[in-house]
């Protein structure tokens, strides 16, 4: 966010400020065995999270979908199909330390999301996390 919006990293990871503005962070698989990436893939989470994505994409107002990583980007097709052109789909590599240098840095997803929202008459997201009280 520092290179995209000039926002200093917060000293915490409490994201309720984003949630109150309508931001939904969603992984395709919601649980994992400790230390075993993708260990719960194919166990039903995908059906659930796909249904959530479809429900959001079916909404009439324009929505921004930010898809990070190859697995998430597989959802782009049905998001575009469901949205019938009214949504914005932004993609890049996953922002994890292992892959971020391969295209995440410089992709400016937060400012692009806000640009789309403003262009469509919606409030931009205040991505700066307030300090904890």
Image (cartoon, rainbow, N blue to C red):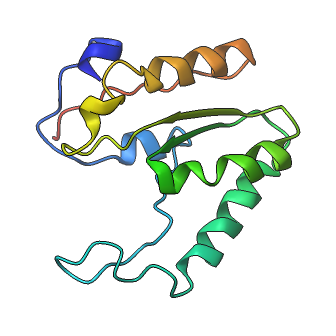
Instruction: Give residue 6's quadrant in the image.
Output: top left
The residue sitting at 73% across, 48% down in the picture is 77
Image quadrant occupied by the C terminus: top left
Pinpoint residue 79: horizontal percent, then vertical percent.
73, 48
The residue sitting at 54% across, 79% down in the picture is 45
Q: Is residue 129 visible?
A: no
The residue sitting at 46% across, 52% down in the picture is 25
Q: How many marks?
A: 0
The residue sitting at 19% across, 80% down in the picture is 34
Pinpoint residue 100: horizontal percent, then vertical percent.
27, 36
Horizontal placement of 73 versus 126: left or right?
right
| The one of 10 and 38 positioned closer to us in this rendering | 38
Horizontal placement of 49 versus 5: left or right?
right
Q: Is residue 22 above or below residue 128?
A: below
| The one of 102 and 40 positioned closer to us in this rendering | 102
Instruction: Give residue 53's quadrant in the image.
Output: bottom right
Q: Residue furthest front?
A: 102
Pinpoint residue 115: horizontal percent, then vertical percent.
59, 14
Q: Residue furthest left?
A: 11
């Amino acid at each position: 966010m520092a290179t995209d919006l000039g926002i200093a990293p917060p000293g915490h990871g409490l994201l309720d400020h984003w949630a109150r503005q309508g931001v939904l962070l969603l992984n395709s698989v919601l649980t994992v065995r400790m230390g075993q990436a993708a260990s719960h893939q194919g166990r039903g989470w995908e059906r659930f999270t796909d249904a959530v994505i479809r429900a959001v994409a079916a909404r009439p107002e324009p929505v921004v979908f930010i898809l990070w990583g190859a697995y998430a980007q597989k959802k782009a097709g049905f998001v575009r199909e469901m949205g019938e052109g009214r949504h914005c789909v932004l993609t890049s590599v996953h922002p994890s330390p292992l892959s971020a240098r391969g295209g995440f840095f410089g992709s400016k997803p937060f400012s692009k999301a806000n640009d789309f929202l403003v262009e469509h008459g919606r409030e931009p997201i205040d991505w700066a996390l307030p300090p904890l009280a």
